[in-house]
Image: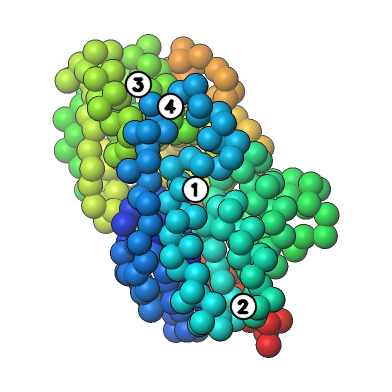
Amino acid sequence: MAVVLSGYGVVRRGAEAMLEDLLPRLAPRFEVSVFSRSGAGPGGVRRAAIPRGLWEPVYLAARPLRKLLDTLYLDPLHVEWTSHLLLSLPALLRGRYDVVWHETGLWGGMLLGLLRRPGGYRLLDVAHSHALGWEVPFARRRPDLFVAQTETLAAEIRRRVAGLRVEVVAQGIDLAHFRPGADKWPLGLPAPVVLGVGALSPEKRPELLVEAVAESRCSLALVGEGPLAERVDRLGAERLGADRYRRLTVDRNEMPRLYAAADLVALASPREATGRSLVEAMACNKPVVSVDDAVRREVVGEAGFLVASDAAAGDWAAAFERAAEEEWADRPLRQSAPRTLERAVERFGDLLASLAQERR
């Protein structure tokens, strides 16, 4: 199996974090080659790319043209993914792989789909968002297998792309690592503390979290980096002050301590396939506040409160206040219980084996 993900070993966000959890556990069952910018991972193959950080300043500055760039799938991620795939392609075709698991976006999915016959491989695509404007065009490239992380997205893809094989594999979390009882990270913020985890980029809407916390009695801790970091830090200083705002970058292994120090975890992004931070927080028995859509209703259940995607900061502030006052008992922990990493590894392993068998 070849896995193509430019950011593997470089950043640890949605797709990268999922694959860094899965691939070492799948490696005993499959011969794996990971194509990335870093060369990390099982059977690592290093290939260059135009990094997203190089294109992001241009993309963010080109506000009048941004919609056109998005329409053409020339956002920073797609520029990185496509350039990386083009430089990986000769080795991919020489490798005669049974399965290619691609995280290469629209243009990559199209090119790899066209080369399936000469390449002799089966193509796997995994949805890492719930943005139908992204995922439906990706699915229409017709990979041999399309994996959704929720039943909600799977049903929508099946409805819109007739005849496509769609399977569901829920986001898997290491419940031995993410669990209640960790020592609290010393945030030094007055309670109640809202924790936001994720890239500081426009689609995550970190500025909304700052504005919402400013209208509540809460404090805010953000964990992450990204193109909006300086802007968000300035806004946090202006609206919350040093006594109610912190931004941190920490090792992934320390995250249970940060969840333990928070009173609730918030995710304002409307595009997440699941929302990894939501599941991790619930596994640490923390309530969550997120966007009200069909996916979040499926994932969060009774473990938090949901807010309309277009709601004002005041509505988010009210949800934070309610979540901080609610008696949650072990509802968040129970909601996370089925989403084990072991179950995801077994499910992906069986699906990959079936694809490899089809190729032979």
Report the residue that reaches farthest toward the bottom. 360
Q: Is residue 248 visible?
A: yes
Quarter residue 196 falls in: top left
**Could you say whether the residue bearing mark 2 is in a helix, strand or loop?**
helix
Q: Nearer the viewer, mark 2 or mark 3?
A: 2
Q: Is residue 126 above or below residue 309?
A: below
**Callout 2, which amino acid?**
Gly
**Callout 3, which amino acid?**
Val
Residue at the disc numbered 3:
210
Residue at the disc numbered 2:
119
* Mark 3 vs mark 4, CA separation in Å: 25 Å
Which percent across, then down, holds residue 24?
40, 74
Residue at the disc numbered 1:
78
Which percent across, then down, holds residue 138?
65, 51
Counting residues from the N terminus, which is met first, the one under dot 2 or under dot 3? 2
Q: How is the image coloured?
A: rainbow
Which residue: 37% across, 33% down?
Answer: 58
Q: Nearer the viewer, mark 3 or mark 4?
A: 4
Residue 116 falls left or right of residue 239:
right
Which residue: 37% across, 66% down?
Answer: 47
Counting residues from the N terminus, which is met first, the one under dot 3 or under dot 4? 4
Counting residues from the N terminus, which is met first, the one under dot 1 or under dot 2? 1
Q: Residues within 10 Å of mark 3 (few under 14, many from 20)?
A: many
Which residue: 34% across, 69% down?
Answer: 46
* Mark 4 vs mark 1, CA separation in Å: 16 Å
Residue at the disc numbered 4:
62
